[in-house]
Image (cartoon, coloured by chain):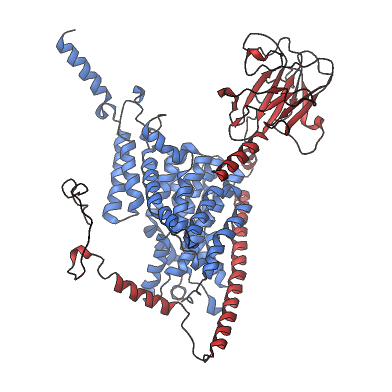
Amino acid sequence: MNLGDFLGQNLSDFWSYTGFANATPEHFIMLAFGLLFIWLAIKHDFEPLLLVPIGFGILVGNIPFKIDAGAEIGIYEEGSVLNILYDGVSAGWYPPLIFLGIGAMTDFSALIANPKLMLIGAAAQFGIFGAYMVALALGFAPDQAGAIAIIGGADGPTAIFLSSKLAPNLMGAIAVSAYSYMALVPVIQPPIMRLLTTKNERLIKMKPARAVSQNEKIMFPIIGLLLTCFVVPSALPLLGMLFFGNLLRESGVTTRLAKTASNALNDIIVMLLGLTVGASTQASEFLTQDTIFIFFLGFIAFIIASMSGVLFVKLFNLFLPKSKKINPLIGNAGVSAVPMSARISNNMGLKYDPSNYLLMHAMGPNVAGVIGSAVAAGALLAFLG
Amino acid sequence: MGCLFLCVAGVMAQGRKAICINEVMVQNDSNYVDDYGMHHAWIELFNSSFASVEISSMYLTNDKANPTMYPVPRMDVNTEIPPRQHVIFWADGEPNKGTFHINFTLEPGKDNWIGLYDADGKTLIDEVVIPASLTVGQSYARIEDGNKGKGETPAAEWSIRDGSDNGYITPSGNNIIIDKNAKIEMFKNDKSGAGLTILSMAVVFSSLFILCLLFYFVGRLFTKTATIRKTKEVADAGVDESVVTPDSGEEIAAVCMALHEHLNMHDNEDLVLTINKVKRSYSPWNSKIYSLREIPRK
């Protein structure tokens, strides 16, 4: 073999390994999605902490390479670095760690002060089951339908946790769909809230919540854990970590642990989770008809969840005395998506009455939504797992 | 360390309880062959848990008076049974052939008692009496793998397998083939999904309703206790009760906000003139000035 042949053959081999030689139109579509996510996050501040890692993960996961080379590059190739990082998603241990951080960050005072707001968090879970019914009608199997429907809980970690158990093959699409709609909450929810409420209802002023004692705050995670996990043990990984994180925060003697859980640990897991979820959307796995259905169902789920939260408050108000009426603008916050949906309630309230601050009231159903969606996930896992 | 040891020991003991005798063949003439190509009686153990369980140092025996007859050897990686998996022990009385060849045999034509003891040689993990009626080529197997039953008679838990279509013999395999997810099959009847919706929403609502109710009463209790304590303090201090102290939270919030504003007014300390001396520990070795550019600010 002369030098020319040698160089030619090696260059040809090298070319066959490059992204250019292995690229397909699907890769470019996915890369465009990744860029769109990054653009939305940086330019429009749509959940940047999630969309930047996910968007970049989409780019990472869709760099074309020679699949049959066995180079241990792809996220689905056992032993590759991405595959090792992806274990937290596929085995479902990132979501409970995120819940630990959420628990350590969340102040449940609003909920403890006004416990009836918990029911709004429960009502908003209708979104999950509405989407479940539509998913069944579209031909999904019950376990797949359950995994897709959890998008309606508006809780990314819960969606990943449940889909990793019920429909691992759909997890990438479910996770991306859940986080996309969470980022779009400011776009999706306000029209629904306006549509379902009258001007008078939007002007309802709620009494300031009472001060909550430290003892009550300490009791909440303990009682919450015992009660919810006795009913739905399958939600233990999520609720156990949520309430554990909250106890670290409220006990007053584990401040260092609470700080680590809510800052460094949470940030690390968010980065890894976002990146690997994004990378799991390899074009060959992601661009299917099922993905389109999943995005459609996610949208339906969000709408039903927001509607049911608002409508439940309206229904609830029929039974409450005039002085204790609830502003239905906080109903949307039952869908979880902490704290974005509570902020929307507050902004909407201020728009109609600049002195009507609803944020603390909306935080009640908002954090109840986190518990509610975890319980709903546990119920789905118990019934379909 | 002590706590850690106790925890690990507890978990191990709990795991070993999941090991059970799952299927036994006493007269093997044409069934499963061992690693020497020989037919021998065999005893199948099953790990009914969803975690790997190490069985070394446990004991297999066919003599109630001698519970430590065959100690499962240590230092063999194969003695760790994966979740929901089986291992076969050959009752050939030839332990020198390897870990899974035990030092006793089973006697055809009479009842054979087999016991499985924990590493302490005292705790009986599982036992079974293989009936004398078992003929050549038949096995005695649990109807459902690992199902130890709850006080039922052996007849309810065990069956004699003869190798026919209805009684297949499954050394190192599941005694019952599960080819469907019963739950999913059941929910396939719920075509519209209304059943699951009602069930799940009932679960969600009842969980949160009970929590709501509980904290409603806890809240009332704490408020009442606080009021009583406050009244007592006021009475003890002889303060005029008509003077209402601020406790709505709004005043406190306003004070907190003012303090926050005051204390954080110089949050961009680098960019403002200040009389405060800015101290930073510096060493050329940790200086990032020369190696990194500043993080851009939006």
Viewer-proximal residue among B23 and A142: B23
Is residue B45 something that shows in the picture?
Answer: yes
Which quadrant: the N terminus of chain B?
top right
Q: Position of residue B79 (x, y in %)?
A: 60, 25
- Chain B: colour as depicted: red
Q: Which residue is drawn at 41% across and 73% down?
A: A357
Q: Which residue is drawn at 49% across and 67% down?
A: A109
Placement of A150 over or under B227, stated as above or below: above
Q: In this view, does B249 lie to the left or right of B211?
A: left
Residue sitting at the far front: B2
Q: Which residue is drawn at 42% across and 42% down?
A: A173
Query: Number of callouts in the render?
Result: 0
Placement of B20 over or under B257, stated as above or below: above
Is residue A196 something that shows in the picture?
Answer: no
Viewer-proximal residue among A81 and A296: A81
Q: In this view, does B265 lie to the left or right of B66?
A: left
Placement of A179 over or under B42, stated as above or below: below
- Chain A: colour as depicted: blue
Q: Position of residue A323 (x, y in %)?
A: 53, 79
Q: In this view, does A222 lie to the left or right of B24?
A: left
Q: Position of residue A373 (x, y in %)?
A: 52, 54
Q: Quadrant of residue B143?
A: top right
Viewer-proximal residue among A38 and A232: A232
Q: Position of residue B158 (x, y in %)?
A: 77, 28
Which quadrant: the C terminus of chain B?
bottom left
Placement of A274 over or under A70, stated as above or below: below
